[in-house]
Image (cartoon, rainbow, N blue to C red):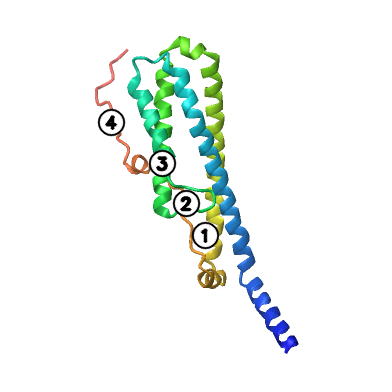
Amino acid sequence: MKKFRALIVLMVATLLAGCGYNDIQKLDEGVKAAWSETLNQYQRRADLVPQIVASVDAYMGHERDVLTQVAEARSRVGSLQVSADKLPTEEELKQFQAAQGQMTSALSRLLAVSENYPDLKANTLFSDLNVQLEGTENRIATARTRYIKEVQTYNTFIRQFPQLITAKVFGYDVKPNFGVENQAEIMQAPKVQFNNRPATAQ
C-alpha cells in the first residue's frame, strides 16, 4: 500500500512538473514582486508631494489653484485601496492608473508654474526636492516597464497548452496590465493644416 501511495505521489508530481505548474508559480511571484516595486516607487512620489507643496507655498501666493490641484491629486492617490499583498483587478488598476495620471499632471503644472518664480527656482530645498522627484519619476517608469513585461510573460505562458489546463484547474487567471494613459489623444487622427497661400517671390 505504501508503494502504491508513493507511486501516485510520484505520478502527480511528474504531471504537475510537466504541465507548467512550477513555472506558473514562479511567474506569478515575479508579477507580485514587480507590482510591489511599482507601488513602492509611487509611494515614494506621494511622500515627496507634501514636502514639495510646503517648499513652494511661501512663493506661490497667487497660484493657490495649482497647489490645491496637487493636494487633491495626492488625496485621491492616498484614498485608493491598493496593496502589495494583492494584485489589483482590471477595474482597480484603471482607477489606480487614472489617479496616478492626475498626480503626474498636477505635478507637471506645478513645476511649469514654478518657472515663473526665480527665487523659488534658486531655493536649495525646492531644487533638491525637484531632483528627487525627477529620479522618482524615472524609477516609476522603470518599475512600470518591469511590471508590464512580467505580466506579459505570465499571461502568455498560462494561455499556452498545456499550461492553459493547469491554470484553469488551479484558478490562475490572466492578470490586468497597465494601459496607455493618453490613449484617447493617441487614437485621434492628427490635424494637418497646410498653408495654401502662394509663396512670395524673393
User: Hey, what amino acid is under mark 1?
Assistant: Asn
The N terminus - image quarter: bottom right
Quadrant containing the C terminus is top left
Q: Is residue 76 left or right of residue 29?
A: left
Q: Nearer the viewer, residue 124 or 161?
A: 124
Residue placed under numbered mark 2 in the picture: 177
Point 27% across, 26% down: residue: 195
Q: Locate residue 179, reporting x and y percent.
A: 43, 47
Residue 118 seen in the figure: yes
- Mark 4 is surrounded, within 10 Å at the Cα level, by few (under 14), some (14 to 19) or many (20 or more) other residues, namely few
Label 2–label 1 contact, CB within 8 A: yes
First reached walking from the N terminus: tag 3 or tag 2: 3
Q: Residues within 10 Å of mark 1 (few under 14, many from 20)?
A: many
Q: Earlier in the sequence, mark 1 or mark 3?
A: 3
On the picture, is 68 further left or further right than 157? left
Q: Position of residue 123 (x, y in %)?
A: 52, 13
Residue denoted by label 3: 79
Q: Earlier in the sequence, mark 4 or mark 1?
A: 1
Q: Is residue 45 above or below residue 129?
A: below
Report the Cα–Cα distance between label 3 and label 2. 21 Å
Query: In the drawing, what numbered circle is on residue 193?
Result: 4
Name the residue carrying label 1: 155
